[in-house]
Structure formats: structure tokens, C-alpha cells
Amino acid sequence: MKRKKIFRWLKIIIILYCSIGIVLYYLQEKFLFHPEKLSAAYVYHFSQIDSGKIHFEEMNIPFNNTDTVNMIKFSPADSIRKGVVVYYHGNKENIERYAKFAANFTKHGYEVWMEDYPGFGKSTGKRTEDILYKEALQVQKMAASKYGKDSIIIYGKSLGTGIAAYVASQSDNKMLVLETPYYSIPSLFSCYAPIYPTSLMSTYKIPVYKYLSDVNYPIVIFHGSNDGVIPYRNAARLKTVLKPTDAFISIKDGTHHNLNDFDLMKLKLDSLLNLQ
């Protein structure tokens, strides 16, 4: 009787485990991406631009016969340009959510080129890991046609850190800066679902650690100790692939969303952008 009870509970546990695993597998795209689409006729509104501090130009870049990458070029009101920051944003909404961060760079004389991923904002087309890489690299190549490698900074935020790391591994630039990165998508998923084989279940891999090991110019990482989205311990694993000259800057009490409010982040970023 006791044995039957044990087997019954074991069966329930196995069914629950498999059922939850199936749900996680088929819904992982929804967990990973939270886009907000915009119509092609939508007119962007940016508060800092409206005040005249930053100018912007909207571009639609053909990726193939059917897909288009929508990108915004933010630029300082001053005509002097020190270089360009190619900015790969996080997994929510669209460019409008991240436009406020352009001021971090334009105040130092940098243009900021910010693309939307497929299905985000006005960008169209199918979204796969390979397409994310190819479209992002296309934007970097456009920047390289205008600026020398010593004037290009690759910047990634949250989900965009993996895309930025890939681009950095495939191109020559001045610097790679990552804000709240992850070791890889499977390793990040394992922080939430440690009992599942996430390396097999994850359709997106984005192995940031692998790409960083192929970057032969300076890398700077910012991560908050209280990050509730990408745990600090996950990002800290990237220290093992950094060069001795790279920097991993821990922001005490920083979360996933507020690093730009900390003086340490502001001072370090300003110092990096002022380097000649």
C-alpha cells in the first residue's frame, strides 16, 4: 500500500515536471521578448529632443526583400562629432523606452545609433538569433563606413549585451560597454528553472562569454549587486573570460533598472567617453 502511494506521488511529480517543462519551452519566446509594435506612420516623441538638446534622424534600413530595420540616429545639437555609440537595447517595448539614455553619450559629442529588433517598434520581419546578429552587424558596418574604428563604441543593455558582444567579436571598434549582461541565455534561464536542462531547451543561446573571449579591445561591464532580473552571480561568471585590462564594475545596491542613477556609473561612463 505504501509502495503504491509512493509511485502515485512519483507519477504526479513527473507529470507536473514534464508539463511545466513543456510550457517553459513553448513560452520562452514570450519570456525573453516583450516588444511593442508601432505603425509605420507613428511619429516618435522624445522629451530631450523636443527641448532642442538632441537632434534625431529616423532611418529604415532594408535587410532583405521583405524585412526592414528601423533605426534612430541621435546626435548632439553641436556640429562637432567625437564618434558614434552603436546602442543595442533591452527586451522591452521599442526605442522610445531607451531614447532617454542617448543623452549619456550625446553630451560628450557622440552620435547614438539605436536600432529596433524585428517585431519591436517599426522594425519588421522574423526574429531569430541569427537574424538579430546579422541585423546588428549591419548597423555596425554602416557606422564603420562613416567613422574609424577608434571612434566607434559598441554598447549593450540587458538583452542587448549579448547582441553587442557578438557584434564586438566580429568587428574592430574602440570599446565594448555592457550594462547588466548575462553569461548566456541558457545559464540565465537556469537561474529561474534550475531543475530543467536549459542548455537543451533554450532556442536562443547567445553565449556572451564565448563572444567576449574573441574581443581584443577594451571591455567594460556594469552590473548591480541587487539585480533581480539578471542575477549578479550570473553576470559575475563573465569575469573568467575578461582580459586583465578589462573592467567589471559592481554597483552596490544597483538593480536591473536604475544603474544610471548611481554616481559611480555616471563617473565611470563619463570617464570612458572622455578618453581620447
Image (cartoon, helix red, strand yellow):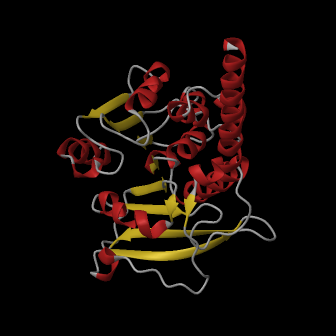
| Residue found 50% across the figure and 44% down from its top | 161
In the drawing, does residue 274 fall left or right of residue 98? Answer: left
Above or below residue 27? Residue 71 is: below
Give 172 or 23, whichever is nearer the viewer. 23
Q: Furthest residue to the left?
A: 263
| Residue found 46% across the figure and 39% down from its top | 181
Which of the 4 image quarters holds residue 265? top left
In the drawing, does residue 137 fall left or right of residue 253? Answer: right
- Residue 247: x and y in percent read 35, 29
Which of the 4 image quarters holds residue 170? top right
Q: On the rendered image, what quadrant is the C terminus found in? A: top left
Q: On the rendered image, what quadrant is the N terminus found in? A: top right
| Residue found 44% across the figure and 55% down from its top | 85
Q: Furthest residue to the right?
A: 65
Give 62 or 78, whichever is nearer the viewer. 62
Examine the rendering and report whether any part of residue 227 can be seen: yes
| Residue found 56% across the figure and 33% down from its top | 193
Give 100 or 254, whichever is nearer the viewer. 254
Above or below residue 180? Residue 261 is: below
Numbered label tally? 0
Above or below residue 60? Residue 256 is: above
- Residue 4: x and y in percent read 72, 17
Examine the rendering and report whether any part of residue 204 can be seen: no
- Residue 153: x and y in percent read 45, 48
- Residue 137: x and y in percent read 63, 51
Which of the 4 image quarters holds residue 211? top right
Give 220 or 195, whichever is nearer the viewer. 195
Above or below residue 204? Residue 151 is: below
